[in-house]
């Protein structure tokens, strides 16, 4: 299972782009170009397919832990822990969410003024080296 991580520190504004950052980016693009697509998704080695796979580097499916995420307070974002969730598709086109078997939790930040429930599915955006919740599964 692919693990999302931040192997290098965020680029500092006004500074030259470090060679390590460029090399890491090129390595990730090369890895994405060689990945095997999920059946039926049409994510191939074409430029359009590469763009779709690159989106997986920017967005992440996850599930909050038993405590959920705290709400934003003023200008301070809320936070909490989440578990990476993979997505699988079988030959019939059925999609399945696959929680990380290693149960490795990571910190995510909540921009909303409302808390996020425990064990809720979320989508995170990787921005400036942190994961910010941009969507949550709201119970009815």
Image: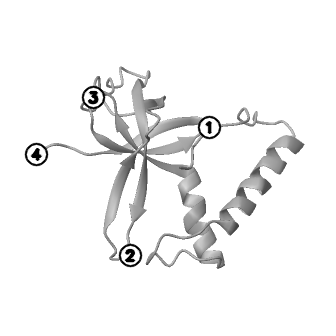
Q: Return the mark for residue 75.
A: none
Q: Considering only order in the chain, which callout, 1 or 2, is on the residue closer to the N terminus?
A: 2
| Real-space Cα separation, disc 2 to disc 4, in angstroms | 31 Å
In terms of secondary structure, where does tag 4 sit?
Answer: loop
Numbered mark located on residue 115 in the image: 3
**Residue shown at 60% from the left, 60% from the top:** 54
* Label 2 packing within 10 angstroms: few (<14), some (14-19), many (20+): few
Q: Position of residue 59 (x, y in %)?
A: 50, 51
100 vs 66, nearest the viewer: 100
What is the spatial separation of the Cα atoms under label 3 and label 4, in whole angstroms? 15 Å
- Please give the label number shown on residue 128: 1
Q: Is 136 displayed left or right of 102 in the figure?
A: left
Residue at (75%, 52%) from the top-left corner? Answer: 25
Q: Residues within 10 Å of mark 3 (few under 14, many from 20)?
A: some
Q: CA distance from mark 4 to mark 1?
A: 33 Å
The quarter of the picture where the C terminus appears is top left
In the figure, is residue 75 to the left or right of 138? right
Q: Could you tell me which residue is drawn at 54 percent across and 74 percent down?
A: 43
Q: Is residue 87 above or below residue 45?
A: above
Q: Would you say 12 lies left or right of 38 here?
A: right
- Disc 3 or 1, which lies upstream in sequence? 3
Q: Residue at x 15, y 43 (%)?
A: 139
Q: CA distance from mark 2 to mark 3?
A: 37 Å
Disc 2 marks which residue? Answer: 91
Tell me whether circle 2 and circle 1 mark residues in contact (CB < 8 Å).
no
Mark 4 vs mark 1, foreground winner is 4
**Nearer to us: label 2 or label 4:** 2
Quarter of the figure with residue 67:
top left
The residue tagged 4 is: 140
Element on which disc 3 rests: loop
The image's colour scheme reads one colour
């Amino acid at each position: 299972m692919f693990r999302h991580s931040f192997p290098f520190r965020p680029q500092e504004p006004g500074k030259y782009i470090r060679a390590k950052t460029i090399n890491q980016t090129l390595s990730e693009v090369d890895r994405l170009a060689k990945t095997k697509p999920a059946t039926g998704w049409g994510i191939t080695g074409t430029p359009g397919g590469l763009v779709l796979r690159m989106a997986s580097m920017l967005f992440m499916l996850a599930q909050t832990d038993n405590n959920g995420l705290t709400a934003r307070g003023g200008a301070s974002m809320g936070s909490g822990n989440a578990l990476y969730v993979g997505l699988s598709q079988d030959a019939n086109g059925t999609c399945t969410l696959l929680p990380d078997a290693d149960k490795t939790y990571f910190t995510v930040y909540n921009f909303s003024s409302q808390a996020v429930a425990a064990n809720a599915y979320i989508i995170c955006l990787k921005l400036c080296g942190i994961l910010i919740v941009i969507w949550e599964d709201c119970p009815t």
